């Protein structure tokens, strides 16, 4: 690889969020030999209808590790409570320390408009950390960064007050099966809790192969409206001919509270996007 490996830090609320929202982009970075670390801020303790406590959090940590292993990413699950996360100073300072010590080129996180309060809390905490990573008086025991990394918001479907702005459109058609493979590692979620929560537990096939197929179709149905919503941006990024052939994309909005995505940074961080 000609350039130094990039360092990508994914900061999300729950074990499975990274795979759900930016699995394709993480897979691309790993294919290119870049470093990807997934930090999950909450322990996932509220994500089940039958299990709870340390048994569930241990299970979810193991699932997060297995999913990260599919693409060779590092994974860390913190211990803040799932379903009760607030963008407190404690969370903000932990994130500042993490961003400083990992020194990422790019941070991926939730947008501040999202249905889940934990997602919003993580988005808020990262936004609040963005400038502070350069301020020595804050979290003074961890050396500051001389400049902010670029922060990008992972795709979401929410429209109020405005839909996610497609600043970067990433073709993830080739990575789609890899995303499903990562998601399938989160058995407690994909085949138990989420189907229960969505009243479709009886639809989940029993065998491994049937489940994988079912999950593939579920994830495709979830992603399809996203792809159609951004068809115009796909065409303007990839051109009409290629744009028509692109089946799956992930779109990212660049945070205006961190480093701007200059042309030079765009070429360095997203060389696979024309
Ligand atoms: Zn989540």
Image (cartoon, grey):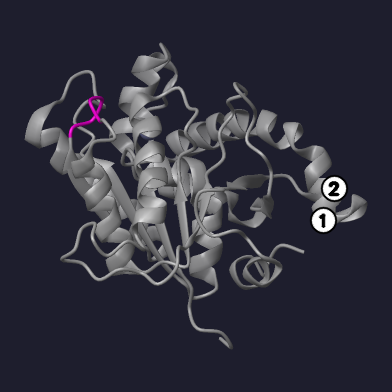
Q: Observer-nearest residue: 211 or 2?
A: 2
Q: Is residue 82 magenta?
A: yes
193 on left or right of 184: left
Residue 182 at x, y percent in the picture:
42, 49
Q: Is residue 252 above or below residue 187?
A: below
Give, as a single range, the part of the protein colored magenta: 81-85
Q: Observer-nearest residue: 190 or 261?
A: 261
Residue 114 at x, y percent in the picture:
47, 27
Residue lying at 75% horizontally and 33% vertically, measured from the top left: 228
Tell me the number on the disc at residue 235.
2
Q: Is residue 147 above or below residue 208?
A: below
Label 1 near label 2: C-beta < 8 Å?
yes
The CA distance from mark 2 to mark 1 is 5 Å
62 on left or right of 26: left
Residue 140 at x, y percent in the picture:
19, 63
Tell me the number on the disc at residue 238.
1
């Amino acid at each position: 690889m000609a350039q130094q490996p990039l360092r990508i830090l994914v900061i999300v609320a729950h074990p499975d969020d990274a795979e759900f929202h930016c699995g394709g982009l993480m897979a691309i970075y790993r294919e290119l030999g870049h470093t990807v670390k997934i930090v999950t801020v909450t322990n996932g303790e509220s994500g089940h209808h039958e299990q709870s406590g340390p048994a569930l959090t241990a299970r979810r940590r193991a699932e997060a590790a297995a999913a990260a292993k599919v693409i060779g990413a590092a994974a860390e699950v913190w211990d803040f409570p799932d379903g009760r996360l607030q963008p407190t100073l404690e969370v903000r300072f932990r994130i500042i320390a993490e961003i400083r010590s990992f020194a990422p080129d790019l941070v991926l996180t939730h947008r501040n408009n999202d249905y889940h309060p934990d997602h919003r809390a993580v988005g808020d905490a990262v936004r609040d950390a963005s400038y502070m990573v350069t301020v020595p008086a804050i979290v003074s025991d961890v050396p500051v960064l001389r400049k902010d990394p670029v922060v990008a918001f992972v795709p979401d479907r929410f429209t109020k007050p405005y839909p996610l702005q497609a600043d970067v459109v990433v073709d993830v058609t080739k990575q789609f099966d890899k995303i499903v493979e990562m998601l399938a590692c989160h058995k407690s979620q994909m085949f138990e809790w989420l189907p229960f929560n969505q009243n479709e537990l009886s639809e989940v096939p029993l065998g491994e192969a049937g489940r994988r197929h079912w999950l593939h179709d579920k994830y495709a149905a979830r992603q399809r409206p996203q792809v159609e919503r951004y068809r115009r941006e796909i065409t303007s990024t990839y051109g009409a001919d290629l744009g028509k052939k692109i089946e799956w994309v992930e779109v990212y909005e660049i945070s205006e509270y961190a480093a701007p995505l200059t042309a030079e940074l765009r070429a360095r961080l997203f060389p696979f996007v024309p």
